[in-house]
Amino acid sequence: MNKPFARMLLTHGAGAGISSEFMQDLARALGEQGILVELFNFAYMAEQEATGKKRPPSRMPVLLQELDVAISLLPQDLPLIIGGKSMGGRAATMLLDSCKAAAAIAYGYPFHPPGKPEKLRTDHLQTLHKPLLIIQGERDTFGNATEIVNYALSANVQTAILSAADHSFKPPKRSGLTQAQHILQAAQLSAAFLRKQLCI
């Protein structure tokens, strides 16, 4: 593991919490790139994991408040980054400009609900002042590579596409690629982006 150069508060998507294989693999890969990861479960997910009973996500204002509190409790010994998978990434981007984080990374941003490309969740991304990297699967049903190029986004928003990957970075077998390769690539892209933004 490289010596940490940044600390990331990393949270999950709507359906699976920080104990999921994806989140654990991503956190491990980021750590190997020198990003110290603090995994964070929203309250509804913590209860779901504790009881085994499925719960719907809390509304976004509640999620943002929980995330803001979690950010405030982190030590400030390293530059702070916020990030998340899908819903968690969206929450991070919505909080970015108003919190002490230097930048954010979204892993599979939910640009729109699957099958409803007209219901965009991009308004705040048009005016973002801090750096954001969105790492998106080429075949993501929440916003694929073809759709993304047409979105009006702030100049502070960068996007990176994972070849043939879906919303969870899984490619079809015929591609010859693997989810593990994409998670590693996502971690490498994250580190390169942050080193550039932090001038390291």
Image (cartoon, helix red, strand yellow):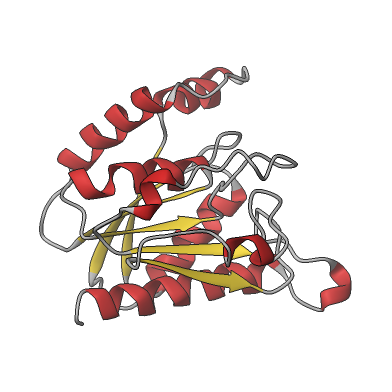
Tell me if I can see residue 39 in this picture: no
* Left or right of residue 105: residue 163: right
Q: Residue at x 60, y 38 (%)?
A: 119
Instruction: Report which quarter residue 91 is drawn in.
Output: top left
Callout count: 0
Looking at the rendering, in which quadrant would you find the C terminus? bottom left
Residue 81: image x %, image y %?
A: 27, 58
x, y percentage for residue 33? 39, 75
Please tell me whether residue 33 is drawn above or below residue 13 in the rendered image.
below
Q: Residue at x 57, y 20 (%)?
A: 56
What is the x, y in percent for residue 57?
52, 24
Front-lying residue, 145 or 167: 145
Residue 64 figure quarter: top left
Up the image or down, 136 lies above or below 21; here it is below
**Residue positioned 15% across, 63% down in the render:** 78
- 2 w.r.t. 120: above or below: below
* Residue 91 in sight in this render: yes
Q: Quadrant of the N terminus?
A: bottom left
- Extreme-right residue of the structure: 174
- Is 195 on the left or on the right of 11, as rendered? left
Residue shown at the point (43%, 60%) measured from the top left: 153
Left/right placement of residue 171 relative to residue 155 reads right
Q: x, y (%) of residue 7?
A: 25, 60
Who is closer to the viewer here, 26 or 200? 200
